[in-house]
Image: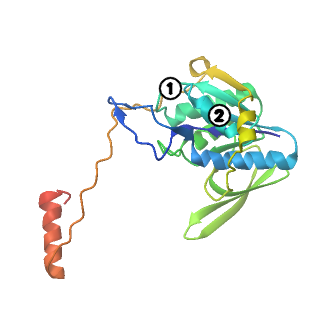
Amino acid sequence: MRIYVCIKHVPDTAANIKIDGDTGYNPEVKYVPNPYDEYGVEAAVQLNETLGEGEVVAVCVGDKGAVNTLRAVMAMGVHRGILVKNDTQLTGSRKTAAALAAAIRADGTPDLVFTGRQSVDSEGMQTPYWLGDDLGLPVAVNVSGFAMEGTCAVLERELGGGTRQVFSVDGPCVIGATKGMNEPRFPKLPAILKAKKKPIREMDMSELDLSCGNDLLLKQLEPVQERSSARILPGSTAEAVESLVRILIEEEKVI
């Protein structure tokens, strides 16, 4: 079985992001594999270990620094990687999915494709759907439970209010993983050293035959404004309500 896992090279959520110019940010921060993607990596590696055959291939769209992200998931048990080189910091979901699909088609025929449910930087939550459309495969997202029964994937996801849905999808298919599917392993030193020797195939996005244009036109990035401190409104309930309405009208200008 050949399993592809789509990985995104993202800034660490604990990193201090600084806006650089109108449409970019300072890249001198720590980058990591997108945390949601790691659930897909763990599911793919576990399945491969259970089957005892096949391979797991990680695919990433990113700059040269994304090699480190691919090495990180290789240390988790991924056999090899594919890097679609792209220096644009924030590429739209549509174009990203098209590049991932083109790279997968150029490499082979997938039996399963894993992604994360979303990325922690742009949080578009669109890539799995576009990827499934490009590959002509069914898509299931927000999946917190996974098992294989023959060529059929038995999946579980949270619907809200404590209700869970269990359903099956015929493979091959695209699965968007989320927290709860498993506990991603923490690689040990021998696995990290071994990952440095695993192959990474590189291809340039400009050389791929992408049928779509860039769906994202970024006009400006702005840092989130710090929230003002809370206020306690004195007086009776009626007086507090009257003060609140005045503040909303005169100061905050929201009504």
**Quarter of the image where the C terminus is located:** bottom left
Residue 134 appears at what percent x and percent y? 64, 34
Given residues 2 and 74, the one toward you in this image is 74
Label number found at residue 15 = none
Label number found at residue 213 = 1
Q: How far is disc 2 from disc 1 in space, using C-alphas?
A: 26 Å
At 80% from the left and 52% from the top, the residue drawn is 152
Residue 28 appears at what percent x and percent y? 45, 32
**Quarter of the image where the N terminus is located:** top right
At 58% from the left and 39% from the top, the residue drawn is 130
Looking at the image, is mark 2 or mark 1 earlier in the sequence?
A: 2
In the picture as drawn, the residue positioned furthest to the front comes out as 189
Q: Which residue is mark 2?
A: 70
Looking at the rendered structure, the kind of residue marked 1 is Gly
In the picture as drawn, the residue positioned furthest to the bottom comes out as 236
Which marked residue is nearer to the observer: mark 2 or mark 1? 2
Residue 132 appears at what percent x and percent y? 65, 40
At 50% from the left and 43% from the top, the residue drawn is 12
Q: Secondary structure at mark 1?
A: loop
Q: Is residue 217 left or right of residue 161?
A: left
In the picture as drawn, the residue positioned furthest to the right comes out as 52
Given residues 192 and 3, the one toward you in this image is 192
The picture quadrant where one finds residue 135 is: top right
Q: Residues within 10 Å of mark 1 (few under 14, many from 20)?
A: few
Residue 6 in sight here: yes
At 69% from the left and 35% from the top, the residue drawn is 58
The picture quadrant where one finds residue 254 is: bottom left
Residue 198 in the image: above or below residue 241: above
Given residues 154 and 83, the one toward you in this image is 83
